[in-house]
Image (cartoon, rainbow, N blue to C red):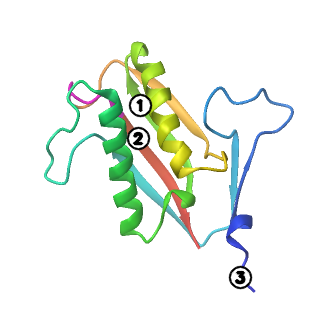
Amino acid sequence: METPKEERIKFRNPETLASPLGLYSHVSRVRCSELVFIAGQVAVDQKGALVGDGDLAKQTRQVFANLAEALKSEDLTFRNVLKFNTYLVGESNISAFMYARRELFEELYPEGLCPPNTLLVVNRLVSKEFLLEVEAVAASW
């Protein structure tokens, strides 16, 4: 008998840890047949052109659109994501990123159970125009 989807991934916030500081869970546990690793995505369209020059909200939407396409290529959705690693340029962008991500996550994770995320504030990315890069680990069953 197949394990119901809702039992395949469990997100938890143990009572022995402080509440998460943002939209993430401290722990994810999964029953899966394969792991899928998605390279860091930046704000470029299908042709490689920058989307949202200097606009963190537009770049965030494009990054997550690219993640969606990568997931889709493996017949997965954001419901399969176990963990994100986020690289954000400059501490001055933290609040704008949190706001943009909250808008997206309300659609992607309406029940409020979000995968773990590590947010790293960096000096710059591979190209100085990029303000954000996000990589993901997902599971298939």
Query: Most extreme residue toward the top, as rendered?
Result: 92
Q: Amino acid at mark 3?
A: Glu
Q: Quadrant of residue 46?
A: bottom left
Q: Residue at x 33, y 28 (%)?
A: 56
In the rendered structure, which segment of residues is drawn in magenta?
A: 127-132
Q: Is residue 127 above or below residue 121?
A: below
Q: What residue did someone put label 3 on?
A: 2
Quadrant (top left, top right, bottom left, bottom right) of the N terminus: bottom right
Quadrant assignment, res 31: bottom right
Disc ID at residue 134:
2
Label 1, label 3: how far apart the Cα atoms are: 36 Å
Query: Could you tell me which residue is drawn at 44 percent across and 72 percent down?
Result: 75
Compared with residue 141, is residue 82 higher up or lower down, i.e. above or below? Answer: above
Give x and y (percent) for residue 101: 48, 36
Height in image: 53 above or below 42? above
Q: Which residue is mark 1?
A: 87
Residue 8 — which label?
Answer: none
Whether label 2 touches label 1, CB < 8 Å: yes
Residue 131 within the segment the image draws in magenta: yes
For residue 79, which quarter of the picture?
bottom right
Q: Amino acid at mark 2?
A: Val
Of residues 101 and 120, the one drawn nearer to the viewer in this rendering: 101
**Position of 134 relative to 21 (above/below):** below
Q: Residue at x 51, y 56 (%)?
A: 78
Picture mark count = 3
Q: Label 3 crowding class (10 Å Cα cut-off): few <14, some 14-19, many 20+?
A: few
